[in-house]
Amino acid sequence: MRIRPFILVAGTLGAVGASAQSSLTVFGVIDAGISRYTTKSETYGAAALLGSRTAGQRQTVLSPSGLSSSRLGFRGTEDLGGGLAASFWLEAPLSNDTGGGIANFGRRSTLSLSGPFGEVRLGRDYTASFWNDAVFDPMTVNGVGTNLIAVVNSNIAASRALATGGLLNGGLSAGTDSYLRTSNAISYFLPANLGGFYGQVQYAFPENIKVEGPGAPAGTGQRGRYAGARAGWTGGPVDVAMAYGESTVADTALNKERIKSFNVGASYDFGAAKLFGELSRVKDVREGPLFARISDRYDGALLGLTVPVGPGLIRVSYAKVKFDNGLPVPNGDASTNKFAVGYVHHLSKRTALYASVARIRIRDGHNNPTVMGVTPLVLSLPAIFPQASYTNTGGFQPRGAMGYDVGIRHAF
């Protein structure tokens, strides 16, 4: 998405030297579409012995992010001379379907210093290990076609946070922190003049209070800590990158849990079409003195394609995620796949019409319905996002879903 910002202020601001040029830019996106979501649950095991039964839910909504997430942002840069620059970026989510305004700058809130050495960035930002899920998704991690790997990873992050003490960082980004974004972070980015090589390292402080002495309450240790890195190379039609991230969601004397994520992605632009691919492995590792080490594993793969057609763009993706249960349970695994196709018609550089459809299939969803019970939304937890969901009681399990988006997006 290309945005032509509106420059509100240019020149010197405050009592600074004559060589310090500053600017303030206001930017944003308004996206509105009609979306329909349907889910299907099905009986399994003993409940299906006398014949399979199904249950379903449906929902039609006016959605604010079928193609791009609605947002309002402010960013500014001051030229400090000698190749140095100071910059800030404040970006807030918008709910234009309900009139929800700027409640926080949860999408991004950073202050940075950049120069020939690269960039040091402080504050809330995307995690280093999330970027490949977005950059190599032809559906741009929005709407019903959102990268299935990203949806499963969001389900893991939010559900495990809820299970170990509550959502991180006040529940920003729908509780997906330490996967999608992280607060309290220090990030370093390589400079842009390295022959196509790029990279990032990132660390987020847990900021928990450590109490010592007699009668001290049980602490949370490193809960909320994130550390990650990403490295890649781009040149001509090629872009390839790998990333690793580790999030601590529990750190007590009785329970320690870390979510470890590794992914590699690539794209190649043939001109007439652009090919995308990604491989991902996420491990949810739990250990404590009262139980053996448990490591659930999620292996994901995505293959996608975009084809420019006149003023439009056809988008296609297929992804699959397999869950390997860390417990020694017979037939305890599960899998899910998603096929999505869409079309974007550009009316101008800023405005586009779009339509997308996605089909989801789930196998053995009863083994992990919270994470693998994927819906057409970017997060499948109805406790956080009220939505058409699955029936997981009475012998039912998640079986599949469909989703549709039709809308318009304007960027400014």
Image: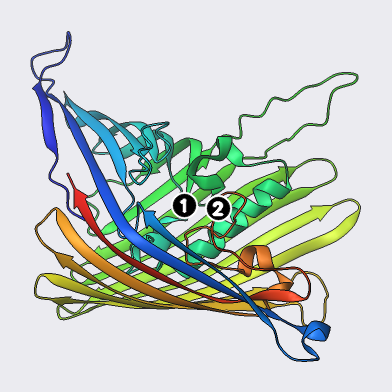
Query: In this orientation, which residue lies closer to the viewer: 287 or 167?
Result: 167
| Image quadrant assignment for residue 140 | bottom left
The residue beneath circle 1 is 229
Disc 1 is placed on an element classified as strand
Q: Nearer the viewer, residue 303 or 387?
A: 387
| 104 or 281, nearer to the observer | 104
Query: In the rendered view, would you say 288 is above or below 217?
Result: below
Residue drawn where x is 74% and y is 35% of the image: 220
Residue furthest bottom as drawn: 50
Lateral position of residue 225 relative to residue 315, left or right: right
| Residue located beneath label 2 in the image | 386
Q: Is 20 drawn above or below residue 389 in the view shown?
A: above
CA gap, disc 1 and disc 2:
33 Å
Judging depth in this view, the residue of 380 and 326 nearest the camera is 380
Q: Residue at x 38, y 61 (%)?
A: 141
Please provide percent x and percent y for residue 374: 56, 68
Question: For numbered disc 2, what is the local secondary structure?
Answer: loop
Q: Quadrant of the N terminus?
A: bottom left
